[in-house]
Image (spheres, rainbow, N blue to C red):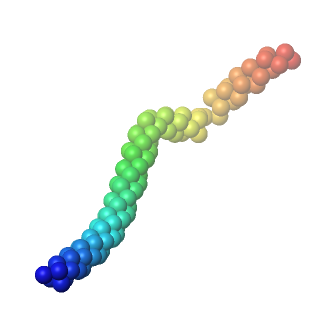
Amino acid sequence: MAKEAVELVKQAEEEAKALLEQSRIYSEKALDEAKVSAKEKYKQILYDAKTEAENIKKKAEEDAQSKAQPTILKGKENADAIRNMDEKELTSAINIVIERIVKTNGNS
């Protein structure tokens, strides 16, 4: 009877060791899976953030371009108007500029 009890205790110990080993293996596997999952989520979050940043940058550039477009067109129109001035108008404009420079510097 005592021999049977000792055998039962040994068997229980072996089962406990087996359960502990299975638990260790399971926990290591779960930890590895968690690390892989965390790495994948990190990559996805980083990708999403970069994509969103690129979209924000693109929208800002488009907004800036649309806001600058009227100023650019006005500048081109002014440049074309200056290029298309006849000689008399150009001479008059030059004289006005020279007169302003001379008056500002006090050399009149």
Residue 79: quarter of image:
top right
Indicate the quadrant containing the N terminus: top left, top right, bottom left or bottom right: bottom left
Q: Is residue 99 above or below residue 90?
A: above
Residue situated in front as seen by the camera: 6 or 57: 6
Residue situated in front as seen by the camera: 25 or 17: 17
Left or right of 47? Residue 99 is right
Residue 15: quarter of image:
bottom left
Left or right of 20? Residue 86 is right
Which residue occupies 21% across, 77% down? 9
Position of residue 75 measured from the top left corner of the image (x, y, whole percent) = 53, 36
Left or right of 65? Residue 28 is left
Q: Residue furthest right?
A: 107
Residue situated in front as seen by the camera: 95 or 78: 78
Position of residue 96 measured from the top left corner of the image (x, y, whole percent) = 70, 22
Position of residue 18 measured from the top left corner of the image (x, y, whole percent) = 24, 78
Q: Is residue 57 above or below residue 1?
A: above
Which residue occupies 43% across, 47% down? 57
Camera sees residue 26? no
Q: Is residue 95 above or below residue 52?
A: above
Which residue occupies 28% across, 72% down? 20
Left or right of 49? Residue 99 is right
Which residue occupies 33% across, 66% down? 31
Position of residue 33 measured from the top left corner of the image (x, y, whole percent) = 30, 68
